């Protein structure tokens, strides 16, 4: 087991990619993510501890996460901008790495969608800035297009840049 104790998504992605590349003797791509809200003090940002309320070690239920984050967004005005940072790292068994950071903007609201995806409760308080839809309410086709646009396209460009 790899302990993800980095301070950023990139640090954790790199740590995992190197460890797995050495373990399996193959080139490995790894990803980690972090969440940041506009208007929230740096020391209070969820960052890489999205599923740890107050940076604790416990892993709260989906319901507890929704309760915590909707209250946080409400304190910040009820509708705020935020972003996910996706740290990406490719590592070789020899320890060589290439990294990138993909930023994905969202609007967060204190009004929870009626459609909650088990395991991904925050999708029900996130709105895609382009379509204006809750991510949890998108059709499968819309979600596929959303993820292709937000992560797939930048990841493809990163892969092209490393040859």
Image (cartoon, rainbow, N blue to C red):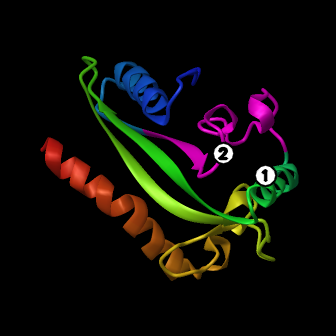
Residue at the outermost left position: 163
Q: Which span of residues is magenta-colored?
A: 31-60
Identify the residue position indicated by label 1 in the image.
Answer: 72
Q: Are marks 2 and 1 in contact (CB under 8 Å)?
A: yes
Question: Label 1 neighbourhood size at 10 Å, few (<14), some (14-19), many (20+)?
Answer: some
* Label 1: element kind: helix
Locate the N terminus and report the quarter of the image it occupies: top right
- For marks 2 and 1, the one nearer the N-term is 2
* Label 2: element kind: loop
Question: Label 2 neighbourhood size at 10 Å, few (<14), some (14-19), many (20+)?
Answer: some
Identify the residue position indicated by label 2 in the image.
Answer: 40
Residue 157: x and y in percent read 22, 55
Whether residue 59 appears in magenta in the rendering, the answer is yes
In the rendered view, tell whether residue 137 sits above or below residue 105: below
Asked whether, in this view, residue 20 is left or right of residue 81, the answer is left
Q: Residue at x 82, y 31 (%)?
A: 58
Residue 4: x and y in percent read 57, 25
Residue 61: x and y in percent read 85, 47
State the separation of the CA atoms marked 2 and 1.
9 Å
Q: Residue at x 46, y 72 (%)?
A: 146
């Amino acid at each position: 087991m790899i302990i993800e104790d980095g301070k950023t998504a990139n640090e954790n992605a790199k740590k995992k990619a190197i460890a797995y590349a050495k373990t399996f003797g193959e080139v490995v791509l790894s990803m980690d993510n972090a969440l940041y809200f506009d208007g929230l003090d740096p020391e209070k940002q969820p960052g890489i501890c999205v599923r740890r309320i107050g940076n604790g070690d416990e892993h709260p239920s989906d319901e507890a996460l929704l309760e915590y984050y909707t209250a946080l967004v409400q304190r910040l005005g009820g509708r705020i901008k935020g972003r996910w940072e996706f740290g990406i790292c490719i590592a070789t068994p020899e320890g060589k790495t290439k990294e990138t950071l993909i930023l994905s903007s969202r609007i967060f609201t204190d009004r929870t969608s009626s459609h909650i995806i088990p395991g991904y409760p925050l999708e029900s308080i996130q709105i895609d800035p382009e379509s204006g839809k809750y991510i949890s309410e998108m059709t499968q086709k819309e979600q596929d297009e959303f993820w292709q646009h937000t992560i797939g396209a930048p990841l493809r460009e990163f892969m092209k840049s490393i040859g």
